[in-house]
Amino acid sequence: MECTRIHTKQMDFSPEPVVLFRKSLLVLVGPSGSGKSTFAKNHFPLTMIASTDHCRAMICDFQGNQRISDDAFDLFYMHIEKRLKNGYPVVADSTALRKKYRQKFWAMADKYEYEKVLFLFDLPLSLCQENDASRRFKVGKDVVAYQFGNLERTKQELHEEPYDKVFVFKSLEEMQTFSYRWLSVKERAQQSLTNSTEHDARTNFKDFFMEKHKTIIEPFKIKMVEPLRSFTREEREQAAKKAGYNLFLVPAEYITFDFLTDSGTTAMSAAQWGAMMVADEVYAGSKSFA
């Protein structure tokens, strides 16, 4: 698939699906009749889509009723914010052809630390008017033409707006062949560990752990009956598995070991503790103790 992108942060399209982070606010921008709602329904779950037309219909059973637009937009923004607050991705389906409306999206995304992803529907005016004329709820040729003028201004403004990703569709074929997959928390963390400084990477690790497990990360305290006298990563991993821990990779600074003793055994010395914690990383379990 080939599609034009107007944002310097983006790479070229490839045959592979576009990778999106789950904590993303996906903003659809384009005139009536450009296919935004159809695109959303074809690519995303209905529960993920916040639509101004749907909000109008929810209020008065008629999505074309412009007189209740203020109430509809209140519901629209509330839908978006509730999903962001609870950590779910959301698609914002409106024309969004005026900067003041797009600014609301930036503010909400920044508040909840979401990526801002914009899809611009830059299809020919004649096609948008034709699509609008074939719909049950029409806005009319003149309205579509007015919105198209706003689209041209929007394209100039987007270069200075703070999106993480921008996609521009210029044909129905590009819209139909678009595909995506979600970036896993593990992939996201690995990217940060690769690209950040050590301090930033470990801070990010906390963020990703908190996002995945919905809890504040605390130092892991691993309790073992026998003193642990193994100093290689493999030996530590083997001992932790034997003790019944589910393993994953954690920076060493987040790990402490509590060593219990049975009769006939002695606790590990401070020197032995230090030797074991020299490595940059240790394996720790999902069990933690207060």
Image (cartoon, helix red, strand yellow):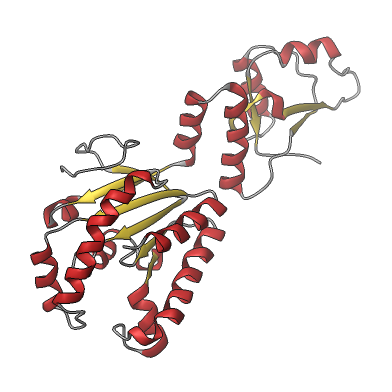
Q: Residue at x 19, y 81 (%)?
A: 138
Q: Quadrant of residue 273?
A: top right
Image quadrant where one finds the N terminus: top left
Q: Position of residue 108 (x, y in %)?
A: 51, 58
Q: Nearer the viewer, residue 132 or 206?
A: 132
The reply to whether residue 269 is in sight is no
- Residue 177 makes an appearance in the image: yes
Return the residue found at the far bottom. 60
Q: Which of the pair 157/219 is nearer the observer?
A: 157
At x 66%, y 48%, the residue is: 215
Q: Percent position (x, y) of residue 265?
A: 87, 18
**Compared with residue 80, is residue 267 higher up or lower down, i.e. above or below?**
above
What percent of the width, then of the height, locates residue 231? 69, 12
The foreground one among 157 and 261 is: 157
Estimate the x, y position of residue 85 in percent, counting from the top left.
56, 60
Tell whether 230 sits left or right of 265.
left
Q: Quadrant of residue 288?
A: top right
Quadrant of residue 34 within the rendered picture: bottom left
For the point 35% across and 77% down, the residue is 54
Horizontal placement of 165 versus 145: left or right?
Answer: right
